[in-house]
Amino acid sequence: VQMQILTATVKLHLMKSTAASAEMLKKCLKAATEESDNPDLRDRGFIYWRLLSGSPEKAKQVILASKPTITDDTGEMDSKMLDKLIGAIGSMASVFYVDPDLVRTRASVMASVEQPDDDEDEWRKNLEQARHEVARGPQPVQATRSSSSSGSSS
């Protein structure tokens, strides 16, 4: 509620600048920056104060600018893909809307390096290659790999 009061007071002052609105803004900014324990409110108060003291016209352009409409596109996504992404909510696949089966994770890379019983040099080479791949970050699986090599997702 305090954040809303602060924002409304600043907007009122920018839309109808009068002596009364200036006095109300001064009191509100003082309370937000000096008397509030809420760090978000205090920071917002300082931002408004700096904007208004620097250039009121620029502050008006920034604070009173029209906001973009927020849209929900979840209905536009294939329901099977959405279920897969929800199942992989902790992975980068869900952030970038990429099929989780196409993203190599650190665990899948390291699991692909099995230690052979007889050739330690080859194992070390494979391990170094896996570490290099992990350092590069998540990469899409190459299209030449068969779908059975990607393994089951857990």
Image (spheres, grey):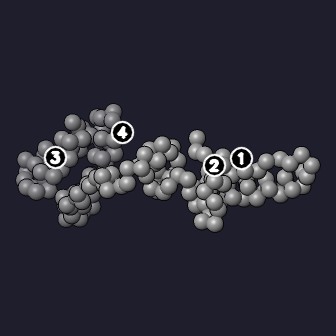
Give the percent coordinates (x, y) of residue 34: 30, 38
Q: Which residue is mark 1?
A: 111
Secondary structure found at label 3? helix
**Number of residues whose C-alpha sits closer than 10 Å to that of mark 1, classed few (under 14), some (14–19) or many (20 or more):** few
- Find the distance from the CA under tag 3 to the CA under tag 2: 55 Å
Q: Which mark is residue 39?
A: 4
Residue 89 seen in render? no
Q: Which residue is mark 3?
A: 8
Give the percent coordinates (x, y) of residue 51: 27, 57
Query: Which amino acid, by three-letter code, is at mark 3?
Result: Ala
Query: Which amino acid, by three-letter code, is at mark 2?
Result: Gly
Residue shown at 8% from the left, 51% from the top:
19
- In the rendered image, the vertical position of residue 59 relative to residue 153, given as above or below: below
Disc on the earlier residue, 1 or 4: 4
**Number of residues whose C-alpha sits closer than 10 Å to that of mark 3, classed few (under 14), some (14–19) or many (20 or more):** few
Q: Which residue is mark 2?
A: 151
Disc on the earlier residue, 1 or 2: 1
Mark in the foreground, 3 or 2: 2
Query: Which amino acid, by three-letter code, is at mark 4?
Result: Pro
**Number of residues whose C-alpha sits closer than 10 Å to that of mark 2, classed few (under 14), some (14–19) or many (20 or more):** few
CB under 8 Å between discs 3 and 2: no
- Find the distance from the CA under tag 4 to the CA under tag 3: 19 Å
- Find the distance from the CA under tag 4 to the CA under tag 2: 47 Å
Secondary structure found at label 4? helix
Residue shown at 15% from the left, 46% from the top:
9
